[in-house]
Image (cartoon, grey):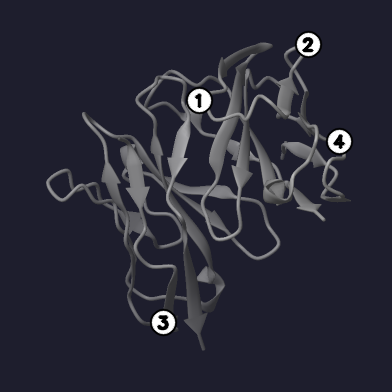
Amino acid sequence: AQRVTQPEKLLSVFKGAPVELKCNYSYSGSPELFWYVQYSRQRLQLLLRHISRESIKGFTADLNKGETSFHLKKPFAQEEDSAMYYCALVSSSNTGKLIFGQGTTLQVKP
Amino acid sequence: EAEVAQSPRYKITEKSQAVAFWCDPISGHATLYWYRQILGQGPELLVQFQDESVVDDSQLPKDRFSAERLKGVDSTLKIQPAELGDSAMYLCASSLVPSQRGLAKNIQYFGAGTRLSVL
């Protein structure tokens, strides 16, 4: 079965500390993975996708097929990073359907 | 910047009543998705349209839920009758095309959602 697991419901760090939001997936074949973010009172929006291999707002995520992980990392957290983060996997059904994890709330304390 | 529009933002209803949600995707986006997000969980797909055709409604409770996209543009999701367990956020998303994996065209853009409370 295709599944995304985000083991932490809440991650709380101090400003300037490193951040790692965990995401593990279950998928046969080559997965296509995304991180979506939802800031307070805003809509869900794309943060980054593994295929782009880009850094957005200082965040990076590397696909590790051996560990079936796609963890989101940032070396120095900022208060404005506080938000809900969702890891998502494109379904193999070729319809583009996204399978989301349960989400992790990141709280960056001053 | 173009956005996915949804209305209403909030809906309170009593169980057994009918409710309807509306979504207007980004202009030119052929694919439209309706997701349900229960508090504390990630969004889960209910139904997906490619133009006016349903391509995935495997998770749609068809005894009470219906969705249409008659002209392949805006869409309506209906619940009749509503049950207490339907209380959730209903999100609409759109993308240019769904099936070309790896391209920017399948990035999904989300609306602000409709929060439904069933009393």
Q: Which residue is painted at 61% across and 15% down in the image?
A: B54
Residue topped by disc 3: A13
Residue topped by disc 2: B71
Q: Which residue is painted at 52% across and 55% down in the image?
A: B41
Q: CA distance from mark 4 to mark 1?
A: 35 Å
Q: CA distance from mark 2 to mark 4?
A: 23 Å
Chain at tag 3: A
Amino acid type, mark 1: Lys
Q: CA distance from mark 3 to mark 4?
A: 44 Å
Question: Which mark is drawn over residue B105?
Answer: 1
User: Please, what secondary structure does the residue beneath circle 4 have?
Assistant: loop
User: Please, what secondary structure does the residue beneath circle 3 have?
Assistant: strand
Amino acid type, mark 3: Val
Q: Is residue A79 above or below residue A29?
A: below
Question: How far from the left and from the top, in percent, is residue B101?
Answer: 38, 24
Q: CA distance from mark 2 to mark 3?
A: 48 Å
Residues at marks 1 and 3 on the same chain: no
Residue topped by disc 4: B18
Q: Are marks 2 and 1 in contact (CB under 8 Å)?
A: no
Amino acid type, mark 4: Ala
Task: Give the image quarter of residue A89.
Answer: top left
Q: Are marks 4 and 1 in contact (CB under 8 Å)?
A: no
Q: CA distance from mark 1 to mark 3?
A: 35 Å
Chain at tag 4: B
